[in-house]
Amino acid sequence: MPPGGRVYWREAAAGLSLKLKTRIFVPLRLLVKEYPQFVPGHLQLADSLFADKKPEQALAVMERAASLYPRQPDLQKGLIKQQTQAKRWLEASITTRQFALLNPGHPDAPAFLQLSDEYQERFRSRLRTQITNNTIGSLITGALGIALTGNPFAGLSALQTSALLLRGETAVGEAVADRAKRQLPLVEDPEIQAYVDRIAQKLTTLAGRKFNYQFYVVNDDKLNAFALPGGKVFINSGAILKSKSEAELAGLIAHELSHAVLSHGFQIATESSEAGGLMGLIPFVGGLFTNLVVADYSRDMEQQADILGTRLLASAGYAADGLRNLMVTLSREDKPFVAPWFSSHPGSQTRIRYLETLITENGYNRYAYEGIAEHQRMQGLVRSHLKKRKRPTTKQIRKPNLKLPTNSRSSLNGDSQR
């Protein structure tokens, strides 16, 4: 560390020994601002803030540090520590699982997977208590709703939605997927479905989570794909048309699959419910969960999905630059990035550079299987289905309306760019 950083560190140490707050916090804040690469500075600042009874500030310090250096294990452990001290059990569960999945060779990875399950159960226990405590209020609200509207279900819908969250990721994903399947025009071609399932099977066996994975192909020529909690993934037929090889399509599928494996959609759903109050959700019958289909993932989430997705791609025997090459292909189009898949994602050139670095630093094989001939045959089948389909209006091809108001969301990473 440069001399200036050492001065800040010595001053903070002196402040800690003398228990003088100004000599603790001022140098530590300057230290993490000017020398963010010094990991102990973040950890000490967070611990000192927690000791000063400022848990939210301590958590914010660790969230920012872990975001800056997502592969630094001590920072991830520090973030988990602050999350558990603040009793943010869902966040702690997700962080520990993500750490284990993104760092499979780390000696603590197996223990972190066990901790993830433990924290998930603590979250569910808290949610059960909240549901129980709110039942009386819901029944009172329901009685008022019946009196005003004549609808006997008016007061129970929020409780139903909370109960669905309590059942976990698979239940949430299945509920939203059932609705999506009714609203989206699915391709019912056994050859195309078998092709996508074969690719997906190679990836899911390596994903590290046991879900009832299901993959659907939507008859839409736009390049788009989205993942729901519990491993339900929807891929537009346009993704098959606009990718140049099986490896490129597999890269897209691996990225979306990673969102499900890393619990990103479930995290968004739960944030939405907690931000507006557990009983403040949109009625269960009318619509489900903020942005689960048009997912407004943070840049941290996108980067995590890139890391895990590219590793899955390489481990499955595909050319590791499949996702990276798909980015390049689309960046060369005359009208770049009109596809919905890019609407909430980082800029194309930034993404290409990051993926290139990721592949190079990890030594992934970019000369493995591409799969061009079979992919071209599938493209022919997709074109025939698109021609048969009557051209819909813009309103008809929109994704299903499964959202909560956007102001009901809050980010676990408060300073993440979106």
Image (spheres, rainbow, N blue to C red):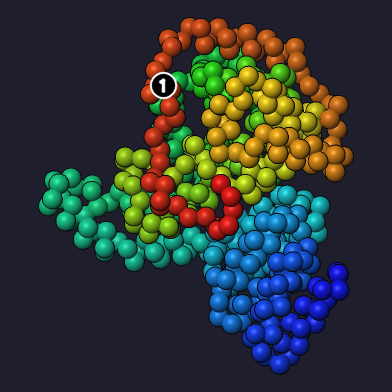
Please tell me how crowded label 1 is: few (under 14), some (14-19), or many (20+) other residues with Cα within 10 Å. Answer: few
In the picture, measured across the screen, residue 401 lies left or right of residue 248, that is left
* Residue 212 shows in the view: no
**Residue 259: horizontal and vertical position, in percent?**
61, 42
Q: Quadrant of the N terminus?
A: bottom right
Question: Could you say which quadrant of the image residue 111 lies in?
Answer: bottom right
* Occupied quadrant, residue 309: top right
Left or right, residue 368 beside residue 146:
right
Seen from the viewer's position, the closer of residues 125 and 48 is 48
Q: Residue at x 64, y 49 (%)?
A: 300
Relative to 20, is 60 above or below?
above
Disc 1 residue type?
Thr
User: Could you tell me which residue is drawn at 81 percent across and 52 percent down?
Assistant: 105
Q: Is residue 380 above or below residue 268?
A: above
Residue 82: image location, x then y, percent:
62, 69
**Considering only vertical position in the picture, is 367 above or below 403?**
above
Residue ID at (55%, 63%): 89
- The answer to whether residue 395 is left or right of residue 249 is left
* In front of the other: 227 or 4: 4
The answer to whether residue 220 is seen in the rendering is: yes
Q: How many marks?
A: 1
Measured along the vertical axis of the image, is residue 134 above or below residue 189? below
Q: Residue furthest bottom?
A: 18
Disc 1 marks which residue? 394
Counting from the top left corner in percent of width and height, residue 239 is at 61, 22
In the image, residue 415 lies at what x, y percent?
58, 57
| Nearer to me, 368 or 38 | 38
Q: Residue furthest front?
A: 4
Question: Which secondary structure, mark 1?
Answer: helix
Q: Which residue is nearer to you in this view: 301 or 147?
A: 301
